[in-house]
Amino acid sequence: MSVENIKIGMLGLGTVGRGVYRIITGNGENIKRKIGAGLEIKKILVRDLNRDRGVELDQQLLTGEINDIMEDPEIKIVIEVMGGIEPTLDFVQQALQNGKSVVTANKDMIAVYGKQLFELAEANRADLLFEASVAGGIPIIRPLKQCLAANRINQVIGIINGTTNYMLTKMTKEGSDFAEVLREAQDKGYAEANPASDIEGYDAARKLAILASIAFNSRVVLDDVYTEGITKITATDISYAGELNYTVKLLGIAKETEEGVEVRVHPTLIPVDHPLAAVNDVFNAIFVSGDAVGDTMFYGRGAGELPTASAVVSDAMDAARDLLRNVPGIISCTCYDEKPVKDMGLVESRYYIRIQVSDKPGVLASIAYAFSDKEVSLATVLQKQTDAVTAEIVLVTHKVREKNMQEALEIIKHLSSVKAISNVIRVEGD
Ligand SMILES: NC(=O)c1ccc[n+]([C@@H]2O[C@H](COP(=O)([O-])OP(=O)(O)OC[C@H]3O[C@@H](n4cnc5c(N)ncnc54)[C@H](OP(=O)(O)O)[C@@H]3O)[C@@H](O)[C@H]2O)c1
């Protein structure tokens, strides 16, 4: 294909769209020299044609009519930055059916409908690129698909939600409560008015499904991911974790094991000297281990206008290169295997457990007995006095299967000396 400029249709001109517009118009000369052709935004679909967009813009670029993009044969690349599933999925399918390459930042759509979309892209010889859908500006999809392609990836462990990382960092540094930190995150615009997607772990779960699919070359969907958010984490747990030389992070953990692919998102204690322990505030990081390369870590801003747009425009440049070489849609999907997803009951982990008990002799022995009966062995025990009649026991176990742990907790919960199991948090790293 030989053209002066490659024409782009954009769906959406919100936070990310504005960044994409700024980069394409502001870095146009560099982009042209890097790929051998210019990128030109020909049309942008929005809902409200009259809204102030915060960028200088020819109003003629805006349209409320999707067919101005879908039916324009000059538009070869569609950048989808409108988000959501409806009507976005229809628009993306339509673009691919019309042979247009698609670049998207939409984790919700890729985590659930990735398979269909990749098949459609391949059938229509179009690219479907989605670097920005996981960890915003951090390059991770392309490194996994290309730079680390020679490896068998053993595990991917990431801090992939900036809002919760900001909240846990604040709770750790200032000893503040969850509710107080959530309010602050909302005031700063880091957390949505309805924060469930972040604090319940769903956002991280979507991203982990995408990462695991690529890392292990086998389709993992959102429903496969065991998901627990950070709503039960208290300043007390964070403080005890610190005493034990751990820090608390919301991790997405994906491992390939003999019993299948393990995919889980939950709050986790990690040793303070683990590389992920130093990832604070809204930053994201993804720790990847491969059989040849060993350990690698990718770090940066997981969201925001320009960081996310950086990934989107780089994908658009790749799609443009493929068009110029006449090879779009050659390697879209890399899920060529069908590996089972491991049952959560079979997952092995260490655990931190905080229990409120009556302060009298023999209590610890009865708890230890219940654990040993289910093959849970204890590595560390701390005892704290809370008041005259209640003590708090903090335990860290050795590795044990989730199923055994749940059975032991069920017994312990009913012991007469146990007032409450206040928290159970998994522990990662040696
Ligand atoms: N924001 C981030 O930091 C970030 C990071 C990583 C990934 N992402 C992903 O990037 C995507 C975009 O996020 P964003 O934060 O830029 O969203 P946003 O600020 O809400 O912008 C959405 C844009 O899409 C347009 N739009 C929405 N529904 C539409 C419809 N039915 N018809 C026509 N136009 C429609 C809106 O038009 P109007 O302006 O006229 O309302 C708006 O311009 C999402 O998939 C998100 O998950 C965002």
Image: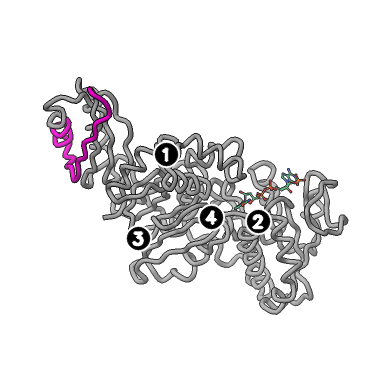
Quarter holding the C terminus? bottom left
Q: Which residue is mark 2?
A: 305
* Badge count: 4
Callouts 1 and 3 close, C-beta under 8 Å: no
* 10 Å crowding of disc 4: few (<14), some (14-19), many (20+): many
Q: Which residue is mark 4?
A: 134
Mark 2 vs mark 1, foreground winner is 2
- The answer to whether the residue bearing label 2 lies less than 8 angstroms from the nearest atom of ligand 1 is yes
Question: Which amino acid, by three-letter code, is at mark 3?
Answer: Asn
**Alpha-carbon span between mark 4 and mark 3:** 19 Å
Disc 4 or 1, which lies upstream in sequence? 4
Callouts 4 and 3 close, C-beta under 8 Å: no
- The answer to whether the residue bearing label 3 lies less than 8 angstroms from the nearest atom of ligand 1 is no
Callout 3: SS: strand
What residue occupies the far top of the structure in this picture?
Answer: 416
Numbered circle sitting on residue 228: 1
Q: Which residue is mark 3?
A: 154
Please provide the residue range marked out in magenta: 367-389
**Alpha-carbon span between mark 3 and mark 2:** 32 Å
Vertical order, 4 against 290 (above or below): below
Question: Which amino acid, by three-letter code, is at mark 2?
Answer: Glu
Based on the displayed image, in which of its 4 quarters is residue 32 positioned?
A: bottom right
Disc 4 or 3, which lies upstream in sequence? 4
From where the camera sits, is residue 286 visible?
yes
